[in-house]
Amino acid sequence: MYLGIDVGTSGVKAIVIDADGVLRAQHSSPLVVSRPHPLSSEQDPSDWWAATEMAVLGLAPQIRAAIAGIGLAGQMHGATLLGEDGRPLRPAILWNDGRSFAECAELEAIERSSREITGNLIMPGFTAPKLMWVRHNEPDVFAGVQKVLLPKDFIRLCMTGDMATDMSDAAGTMWLDVGARDWSDAMLAASGLVRAQMPRLFEGNQITGQLRADVAARWGMGRVPVAAGASDNAAGAVGVGVVRDGDALLSLGTSGVIFVATSDFRPNPARAVHAFCHCLPGMWHQMSVHLSAASCVDWAANLLGLAGPAALFDLAEATGAGTGGELFLPYLSGERTPHNDAHVRGTFLGLDNATDAGRVAVSVLEGVAFAHADGLDVLREAGTAVERLSVIGGGSRSRFWGTILASVLGVPLDYLDGGEVGPALGAARLAQMAVTGASAAEVCVRPPVSHVIEPDVALAQRLAPKLAKFRAAYAAIRDL
């Protein structure tokens, strides 16, 4: 059996698959985010490790004893700064932290070929500008940095003692020459860093080390090999078989992503499209990234005093899509694609005396769909054809939301059995490839389609005027 561990923003998930790829067990442990200052988003790396141990130990002992390999997935971009003793020097700065906006411009000014090297417009969520912020605002911390790790790779260090990462996660740091799949000395120098402060690079299906003896004993398993793994988005793609040129998925997690696998490096930084390495050798991918997706549902459910996301979906469905004039801009943590704006914030427009909780709930679901329509448009501008999307993530549980999304995006949505498992499944598949030497074609099969949601033409027509207003609204509120 193979264990996949996903270090997410809201929790750590551990899942186990057998040799046939069948899900045999899963367990999760929650995490919280700290926001000590405006624009900030942080977590204590020790909390990741505690949650990982809880997630793994929540699996049955007989399952753990049968594990033959482990793969890791995790939230991207998090700056985990380690000192000489290998311990974190400060809380990790997360992917949805927006404090380093000025440092993005500074980095691009220092290294004028940054977009050619990285394939991306430098954004506050990426790792490199975070280090520049630390350099300017916490110079003592910066001076003590011996190694910079990404969240899943800090867990690897705790598990194996190795400092390593994979290509898909490394690509999101802005220190990788993405086309060459190697650290860029020029980008490191622009940040005041050197290669020695970076972890070793591996493809996602390569072994980076083995479980430490003390961890193996505590977890009730052998000193099994640990695969490099992947960023959460790349791992999610592997989990649902998005590994060939043109395969595409829609991820509805804390953030929202449209991910397209490509056989070559296809950057489009001008429109805030992400172009990163895939976690498989010789593959890349494009993404549109929206910082708030299913997190908007959690937030709105809490705001409305509902029991949780399921209650919000039920309330919205009872109200009906396209029935009110309320408009929601889902920029609770700023936005990436296509605006690259860390300062913009969420907004409700068009409220009136008839606005009630149901219409607010519907507007939140519509607003996230409109943001993804922006993302799909810029992917198409980059020459990427998207004919249909496989859906994964916690937001995939709602068929009602799926109808809104399919209608706004204008493409069929394929809902896959086990699609809600997410990146942990891809991590387990990478472990299986690493241990057995099996190919992606053999292991990364697409799960069965449980159902397909086709666009509703009438709903799309009702929502088209709201989508136009949504696109005009960003320009209107940006400077506020």
Image: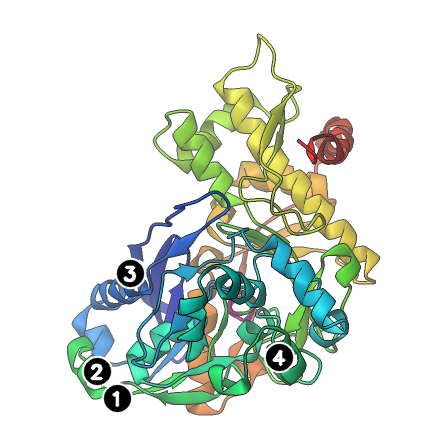
- Of mark 3 and mark 4, the one earlier in the sequence is 3
Q: CA distance from mark 2 to mark 3?
A: 20 Å
Question: Which SS class for mark 2?
Answer: helix
**Among the 4 quarters of the image, the one containing residue 400:** top right
Question: Which SS class for mark 1?
Answer: loop
Question: Which range of residues does the magenta coloring cover?
Answer: 235-241
Q: Which residue is mark 3?
A: 47
Q: Give the amino acid type for the residue marked by disc 4 in the picture.
A: Ala
Give the percent coordinates (x, y) of residue 315. Answer: 47, 25
**Among the 4 quarters of the image, the one containing residue 176:** bottom right
Asked whether the viewer can see residue 130, the reply is: yes
Q: Which residue is mark 2?
A: 216
User: Badge 1 local density, few (<14 within 10 Å), some, or many (20+)?
Assistant: some
Q: CA distance from mark 3 to mark 1?
A: 23 Å
Give the percent coordinates (x, y) of residue 254. Answer: 48, 49
Q: Which residue is mark 1?
A: 223
Q: Are marks 4 and 2 in contact (CB under 8 Å)?
A: no
